[in-house]
Amino acid sequence: MTLAILPVKLNSERVHNKNFRPVGAFELGIFEIKFKQLIDSESISSIMITSDYQAVLTIAAELYEKYNSTKSIHYHLRPKEYSGSCPNHEWVAYLSTQIRHIEEEDVMLCFATSPFFDEEQIDLFYTSYSKSNYDSMAVASKLQTYIWRDGKPFNYDKGWPITQSLSPVYVINSSAFLCKKDAFIKTQDRLHGNVGFFESTWINSCVNIDYPNDFENFLLLWDSYKNFKR
């Protein structure tokens, strides 16, 4: 099955207390939301919480007991140099060296900042990947409209062709990445080989929490989302 790797910061540089700010019934915020989604996902058999703060791992252990999960869980204390402003490719490469002892065949790298990418979407993502011939896959938003770059059309030559004929552009929204564990270790990259894309739902595409206004937008949509899921 699949190992879910969930990197978590104690403090966010742009949004204060972003990961642990209470959201409705979730006292530990979007971290708790994502943690529960991973527990509830049928595709995830093991969870690795990685952080540069022991306090985060302590919180994760408390949540693990709270939800009484039977899934395997791994607590990983990440060196400070692989956190904060460390470039993404460097801390991702480092994580690939830390999972050799874990038995799962597949690895899903996911993030608390995509709270609408829930357990149903996680399972659909895994199913899409497992039925494909792709070496790795990312969750992305599909754009198939008129796109300009550097003062000229980017995905069409001239005139106004019908949008259905335009070549789509995929915007990786960092909800999740999925690949084989052995390939992740070998390439030290979350996207490699023949890359595929899984189209996220519209609500996940419109809210990825990176800035203060993103969090406010998320709070406005969360109650409606929960009512819709009932």
Image (cartoon, rainbow, N blue to C red):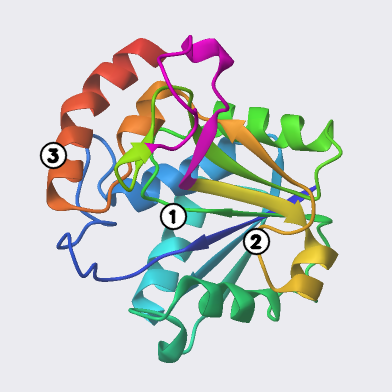
Depth check, front residue: 15 or 58 = 15
Residue 59 in the image: above or below residue 186: above
Specify the quadrant of the image occupied by residue 104.
bottom right
Q: Along the polypeptide, which appears first: circle 1 or circle 2?
A: 1
Under mark 1, the amino acid is Leu
Q: Which mark is residue 63?
A: 1
Residue at numbered disc 3: 216
SS assignment at label 1: helix
Residue at numbered disc 2: 190
Q: Is 170 left or right of 87, judged from the image as shown? A: right
Q: Position of residue 36 (x, y in %)?
A: 48, 42
Residue 156 is inside the magenta segment? yes
Which residue does the image show at 21% across and 70% down from the upper left?
Answer: 13
Dots 3 and 2: beta carbons under 8 Å?
no
Which residue does the image show at 44% across and 23% down from the upper left?
Answer: 158
Q: Position of residue 98 (x, y in %)?
A: 68, 79
* Front disc: 1 or 2: 2
Residue 160 in the image: above or below residue 112: above
Specify the quadrant of the image occupied by residue 4.
bottom right
Which residue does the image show at 38% across and 70% down from the upper left?
Answer: 56
Under mark 3, the amino acid is Glu
Q: Residues within 10 Å of mark 2 (few under 14, many from 20)?
A: many
Q: Is 166 left or right of 192, judged from the image as shown? A: left
Q: Position of residue 145 (x, y in %)?
A: 42, 22
Q: Label 3 to label 2, Cα distance in Å?
A: 30 Å
